[in-house]
């Protein structure tokens, strides 16, 4: 439903303020929905329609119960699309609607201008509807149960992608000499030119060339280098039916669309919160709305020891960056200052803060954002300590005040969204067509139950045994799944076995 005249007037006013501040947004379309309609859209990941799947119903049920029992409430939903679509809940107060609109314009600016969203599909609203049509057609043709079961399998693997691959430019121009073609050239008998077609008939040379090519392919390593985009490798080499390829392509495409949102959660929410706070307090709020705004804004930014609130961390870090660049608290000269009080009070009145946060918004993701801009003074001001639970009292207490350890812990949780790095290193293991995967271990073991389920689903798609090299309790082990319905076997790898991990020869 379109906006009421009052809300439409507020939208025009807030959009004008956003552009005055320098925000650059796609056209933004707001729709007014009831709570059940908004919960339905939220269950679909922010889209009005998706392919049919039981998990959307489960998510809707959870959202609906949370709203009914007063445990949760959706204030805003916005989609990375051109134009951007955003949804407002009809029952919200006017001050909440204005806060949400200002927040949405912050998100829209971030979607349009942040580097990590540059390669996303800006027509995903239409694409999602098309995906729903394709899956429904397949369910009618193939059957509901087989399509849904295969979709379950693919969705359990949707984190096995390489979000950086969209930014890699690969050489496509042909090289001067291709060694593979030289290896595939058949041996020919020497003959005069006019006798060559009789002594070396075309059919015979073609058969010889095909035989050599097959032998070369069997001996060649597949893939030539480790591949992190496991879904892409499965699409190219797994023995899939055409309808299965269509389903897996849909899951992979949507995984890449949502990946930048996971990579920039702190920045995105922090940027939107920074701008709704700025616009509401400087331009939009009426005196009668201040208390309600302060109550709802503080609830959004509330945090407690040991828990990360992306809204709070993001907005405070953007504010800190703006303040530091306004005062000249950056660069090697500032970092090398030994007098902490002088360092804290430094103020060169450069006024570069607003320009700097726009630059940061354009180029960073959460990992680089946290790594580059969290410093000792900020960590102490935000009480960023390492917390733990005292077993005797059951209370959460400070375990360590070293800000570097807090930063390290935070970066560890943000890198690859806390997901393991899995690579395909051999698609023809032991020349038996088996799949060999390598887990790039970073200090944390795989969750064994998740690893088991993933291997079984990979085994079902690959239709051959699947192996996973990883570390468990500081020992190199090989997990093997011989068939999708069987058990996972585990054996320790000996030092003499050929390494098949990243960088192995």
Image (cartoon, helix red, strand yellow):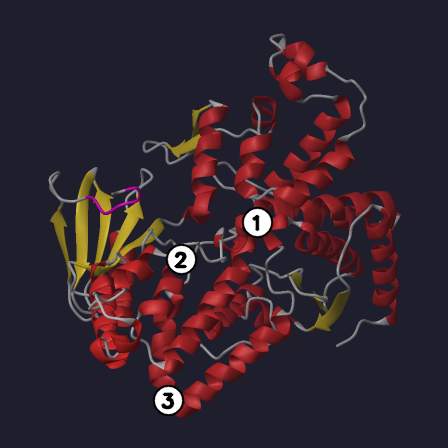
Point out the tag, 3 or 2, that comes first from the N-terminus. 3
Look at the image and tell me whether residue 445 can be seen. yes
Find the distance from the CA under tag 3 to the CA under tag 2.
28 Å
Residue under numbered circle 1: 265
Q: Residue at x 78, y 43 (%)?
A: 278
Residues rendered magenta in the picture: 499-503
Marker disc for residue 379: none
Which one is in front, 359 or 198? 198
| Cβ atoms under marks 1 and 2 closer than 8 Å | no
Q: Which quadrant, please, contains the C terminus? A: top left
Mark 1, other Cα within 10 Å: few <14 / some 14–19 / many ≥20: some
Which sits in the foreground, 416 or 173? 173
Query: Cβ–Cβ below 8 Å for labels 3 and 2?
Result: no
Tell me, for residue 142, which label it has, or none: 3
Residue at image mark 2: 229
| Alpha carbon separation for disc pair 1 and 2 | 22 Å
Residue 157 visible in rendering? no
Q: Is residue 387 left or right of residue 111?
A: left
Dot 2 crowding, Cα within 10 Å, few <14, some 14–19, many 20+: many
Few, some or many residues within 10 Å of mark 3 (<14, 14–19, 20+):
few
For the residue labelled by badge 3, is the local secondary structure a helix, a strand or a loop? helix
| Pointer 1 with pointer 3, Cβ within 8 A | no
Left or right: residue 72 versus residue 466 is: right
From the viewer's side, name the closer residue of 503 and 234. Answer: 503
Q: Nearer the viewer, residue 221 or 411?
A: 221
Q: Is residue 39 magenta?
A: no
- Secondary structure at badge 1 equals helix
Q: Quadrant of the N terminus?
A: bottom right
User: Between disc 1 and disc 3, whose residue precedes?
Assistant: 3
């Amino acid at each position: 439903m379109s906006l009421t005249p009052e809300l439409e007037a507020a939208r025009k006013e807030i959009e004008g303020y956003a552009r005055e501040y320098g925000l650059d947004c796609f056209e933004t379309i707001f729709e007014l929905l009831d709570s059940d309609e908004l919960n339905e859209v939220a269950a679909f990941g922010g889209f009005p329609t998706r392919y049919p799947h039981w998990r959307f119903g489960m998510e809707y049920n959870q959202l609906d119960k949370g709203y009914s029992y007063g445990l949760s409430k959706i204030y805003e939903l916005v989609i990375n699309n051109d134009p951007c679509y955003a949804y407002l809940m009809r029952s919200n107060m006017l001050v909440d609607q204005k806060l949400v609109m200002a927040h949405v314009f912050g998100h829209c600016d971030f979607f349009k201008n942040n580097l990590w969203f540059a390669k996303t599909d800006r027509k995903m609203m239409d694409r999602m509807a098309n995906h729903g049509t394709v899956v429904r057609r397949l369910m009618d043709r193939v059957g509901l149960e087989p399509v849904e079961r295969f979709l379950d399998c693919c969705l359990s693997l949707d984190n096995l992608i390489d979000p950086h691959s969209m930014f890699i430019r690969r050489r496509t121009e042909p090289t001067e000499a291709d060694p593979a073609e030289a290896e595939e050239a058949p041996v020919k008998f020497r003959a005069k030119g006019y006798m060559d077609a009789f002594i070396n008939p075309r059919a015979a040379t073609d058969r010889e060339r095909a035989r050599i090519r097959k032998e070369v392919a069997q001996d060649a390593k597949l893939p030539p280098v480790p591949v992190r985009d496991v879904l892409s490798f499965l699409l190219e080499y797994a023995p899939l039916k055409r309808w299965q390829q269509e389903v897996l392509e849909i899951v992979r495409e949507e995984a890449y669309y949502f990946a930048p949102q996971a990579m920039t959660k702190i920045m995105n929410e922090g940027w939107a919160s920074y701008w709704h706070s700025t616009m509401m307090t400087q331009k939009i709020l009426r005196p009668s709305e201040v208390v309600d705004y302060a109550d709802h804004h503080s609830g959004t930014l509330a945090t407690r020891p040991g828990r990360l609130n992306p809204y709070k961390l993001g907005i405070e870090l953007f504010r800190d960056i703006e303040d530091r660049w306004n005062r000249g608290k950056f660069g090697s000269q500032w970092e090398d200052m030994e007098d902490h009080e002088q360092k804290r009070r430094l103020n060169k009145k450069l006024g570069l803060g607003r320009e700097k946060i726009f630059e940061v918004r354009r180029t960073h993701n959460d990992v680089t954002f946290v790594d580059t801009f969290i410093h000792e003074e900020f960590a102490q001001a935000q009480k960023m300590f390492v917390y733990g639970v005292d077993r005797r009292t059951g209370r959460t207490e400070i375990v360590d005040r070293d800000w570097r350890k807090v930063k390290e812990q935070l970066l560890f949780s943000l890198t690859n969204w806390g997901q393991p790095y899995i690579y395909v290193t051999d698609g023809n293991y032991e020349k038996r067509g088996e799949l060999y995967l390598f887990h790039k271990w970073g200090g944390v073991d795989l969750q064994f139950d998740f690893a088991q389920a993933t291997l079984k689903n990979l085994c079902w798609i690959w239709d051959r045994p699947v192996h996973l090299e990883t570390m468990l309790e500081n020992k190199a082990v090989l997990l093997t799944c011989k068939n999708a319905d069987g058990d996972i076997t585990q054996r320790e790898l000996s030092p003499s076995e050929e390494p098949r991990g990243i960088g192995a020869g």
